[in-house]
Image (cartoon, rainbow, N blue to C red):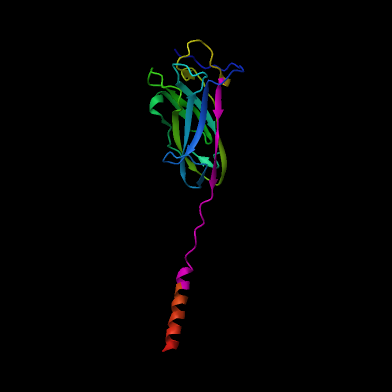
């Protein structure tokens, strides 16, 4: 069945990969955005056991994420959007600027989804100010909020260091400069006056 993740140290191959991905609001990957814009941070988990077992997939996962709140900020009232598959035992604390804590959930099905990447959750974040921030994921586990894989029937093979975490960076660039148009009407009047003067001389 499933095996629960523990914090015991062991030098063993990764069983799961947890990756942070930044996209625009349409789901397209991005590496930069203008200040004042909004984007999505997505957590992707994947069963990376080799060789791939007949029964595979991530059943439950929970992560912490750290980032620079002076560059990117989760605005008050924002909530995590858990993927439909991970729609039970959901959790996630967004109350501390620059931190996402215990964000994850468990699978709604006992049918293994396989070893393809699985969306765990996404959250909308505001590009606050120019700069570069790295979204750094880390391990979280608590009673009832453990990392579980399909097909593991021995306890405990699933150690903390068997989760490979992959962060990502985003650069927030300044908004484009806006031109001051107050002087434009005067310039247009000057052009009109010159043209009128030329017309009078021709007469």
Q: How far from the left and from the top, in percent, is residue 180?
A: 49, 63
Q: Is residue 151 left or right of residue 137?
A: left
Magenta-drawn stretch contains 165: yes
Q: Is residue 167 left or right of residue 2?
A: right
Residue beneath the point at 49% across and 41% down = 30
Magenta-drawn stretch contains 61: no
Q: Is residue 169 left or right of residue 110?
A: right
Question: 52 or 142, which lies in front?
Answer: 52
Q: How far from the left and from the top, in percent, is residue 72?
A: 52, 41
Whether 160 is drawn above or below 120: the answer is: above
Which quadrant of the rendered structure holds the N terminus?
top left
Residue beneath the point at 45% across and 75% down = 189
Q: How far from the left and from the top, in percent, is residue 42?
A: 47, 33
Which quadrant of the rendered structure holds the C terminus?
bottom left
Residue furthest to the front: 51
- What residue span does the magenta drawing correspond to? 162-187
Whether 97 is drawn above or below 33: the answer is: above
Q: How far from the left and from the top, in percent, is residue 2?
A: 46, 14
Question: 185 or 31, which lies in front?
Answer: 31
């Amino acid at each position: 069945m499933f095996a629960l993740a523990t914090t015991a140290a062991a030098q063993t191959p990764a069983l799961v990969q947890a990756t942070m991905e930044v996209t625009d609001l349409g789901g397209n990957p991005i590496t930069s955005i203008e200040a004042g814009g909004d984007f999505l941070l997505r957590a992707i988990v994947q069963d990376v056991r080799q060789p791939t077992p007949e029964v595979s997939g991530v059943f439950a996962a929970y992560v912490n994420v750290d980032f620079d709140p002076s560059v990117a900020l989760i605005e008050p009232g924002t909530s995590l959007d858990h993927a439909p598959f991970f729609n039970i035992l959901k959790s996630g604390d967004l109350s501390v600027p620059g931190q996402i804590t215990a964000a994850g959930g468990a699978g709604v099905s006992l049918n293994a989804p396989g070893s393809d990447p699985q969306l765990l959750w996404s959250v909308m974040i505001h590009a606050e100010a120019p700069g570069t921030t790295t979204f750094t994921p880390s391990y979280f586990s608590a009673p009832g909020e453990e990392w579980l894989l399909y097909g593991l029937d021995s306890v405990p093979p699933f150690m903390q260091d068997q989760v490979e975490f992959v962060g990502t960076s985003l650069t927030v660039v300044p908004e484009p400069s806006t031109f001051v148009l107050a002087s434009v009407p005067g310039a247009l009047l000057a052009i009109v006056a010159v043209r009128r003067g030329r017309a009078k001389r021709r007469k």
